[in-house]
Image (cartoon, rainbow, N blue to C red):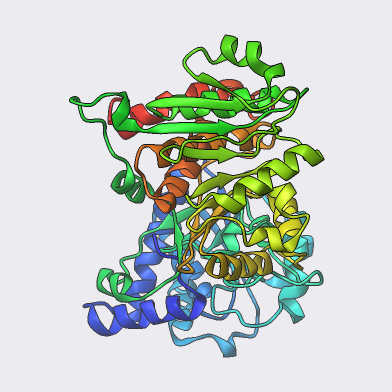
Amino acid sequence: MKIFSAPQIKKADLYTIENEPVSSLALMEQAAESCVRFLTAAFKENPVFSVFCGNGNNGGDGFAIARILYQNGLDVNVFVDEDYSHFTPDARSNFGRIKEMFGISVFDFKEIEKFDFSASTLIIDALFGTGLNRKLEGKVAELVPQLNKLSFPKISIDIPSGLFADTIPTKDSVVFKADHTLSFQFWKKAFLHPESGIFCGKIHIMDIGLSPEFIEQEPSHNFVIAEALIRGIFKPRNDFSHKGTYGKTTIVAGSFGKMGAAVLATQSAMKSGSGITFTLAPKCGYEILQTTCPEAMFLYGGENYITHFEIDTDSAVGIGPGLGTGPETEDAFLSFLKNYRMPLVLDADALNIISKNENSIKLIPKHSVITPHPKEFERLFGKTANSFDRLDLAVKKSKELDIFIVLKDHHTQIITSEGEVFYNITGNSGMAKGGSGDVLLGMITSLIAQQYSPQNAAILGVWLHGKAGDLAAEKHSKVGMLPSDLIHETGNVFKLLNGRV
């Protein structure tokens, strides 16, 4: 699913109006109807809707929503600025229809201070949409903090007022804080970054009938990983296949006291479909691995730490979990990198070793996949002011090094060497535990072994990892789930992809 910028969204609206049999007012009506369908389905306890409308087209959407809710037999109050002179034509038209309805009460913003809200109130924010190009000021800047203090559920129409679609808000910005955001047709970058996404609550994409032709033709370098993309990548198993069909995976991991990381990565690789799995680890972890991962074969890598990197070139290789950064391991790993040319999957201590010297970064083989969390990324490439700048730097470095960067975050981003960014929307905060990254490395490495391209392995692996996390959270709760639960739920995700659940 493409992510469009605010100017592109405006182009989509105009193209639809010019090329489809629909007027701007009719398109606004379609948007309002889609929102009302969600609101009436999601909130069934006879709520009272208090709709706060601006003077632009987002306000026009709010007026139309209020009218349709009222026509559906629901109680509605509308709040506006008493100065009606700056309404857009479509907003003015829908406001006029509101004024004709005796059952809808219209109040000025300033009346909120003494307004007696019903206990079943729902707050609808239709103040400003994606067309906003400056910080909130004046009456609205005073209103929004008052609304944020109210304890009622809050729903934003298209985007929380005060938020920009393509950049993060400054520290002094006033932004409406929603529990739900009903976004028209598209995800927006602001929904997917921590500094701005925190204002959005749960995102719901409303199909409002924008031109499919425009969406198909308009270019974008940013995408949300939708299930349709995953089903296009996923390869169902051929009945006439054998273990050699699904490749050889080698996990290089573990050190004294950190063998759990090697276990998680190995089990994850096997559960993700690896045909033959090896674990190169220190001798101190031999019994642990043979006991917990009997399907995998052990390769000697040293005594208490890995000091030997002898790996077959016909194997997909993942390196890093629990590796340690001691001098012998560091020397052996960097020596290996100088002589190895096949793509690798690198995480954790493999990245920490590389980050010690900027020249080591150039040793990463082309088409490799690296999976840093924000702090590891900073150690590799430098500090950035925010997650938008971090992503821009990741795009630059991915192109320079010809690698794929899996930038782990609440909405993990997969950045390709072509400058494309794929945002993942599976997963949850229950996965914020040590060991989750080890599971991800095992998944991606296993998928590369099964002849997925590094790009598709990264996209599918990140989605699979998050989806398993969502199933684990349903079963165990976000607090109580463990990284090992992701491994246990992987088979259920594959059942979903195969259409068996």
Q: Nearer the viewer, residue 240 or 220?
A: 240
Decide if residue 393 is on the left or right side of residue 487: right
Residue under the point 69% across and 31% down: 306
Q: Residue furthest bottom?
A: 85
Residue 470 seen in the figure:
no
Image x and y of residue 102, in percent: 48, 66
Which quadrant of the figure contains the C terminus?
top left
Q: How many marks?
A: 0
Quadrant hosting residue 8: bottom left
Location of the N terminus (image quadrant) = bottom left
The residue under the point 74% across, 26% down is 258
Q: Quadrant of residue 433?
A: top right
Observer-nearest of 269 and 49: 269
Task: Determine if residue 147 is in view.
Answer: yes
Q: Quadrant of residue 106?
A: bottom right
- In the rendering, at what x and y percent does residue 158 appear? 51, 65
Q: How far across and down, in percent of the image, does residue 212 sit?
A: 27, 68
Q: Is residue 166 above or below residue 459?
A: below
Residue 430 x %, y %: 65, 33
Which residue appears at 47% of the width and 70% of the height?
61
User: With 192 as the anchor, is 216 left or right in this view?
Assistant: left
- Judge from the rendering whether residue 6 lies leftward or rightward of residue 500; answer left or right: right
Q: Residue at x 29, y 75 (%)?
A: 217
Along the viewing direction, whichever of 417 and 474 lies nearer the viewer: 417
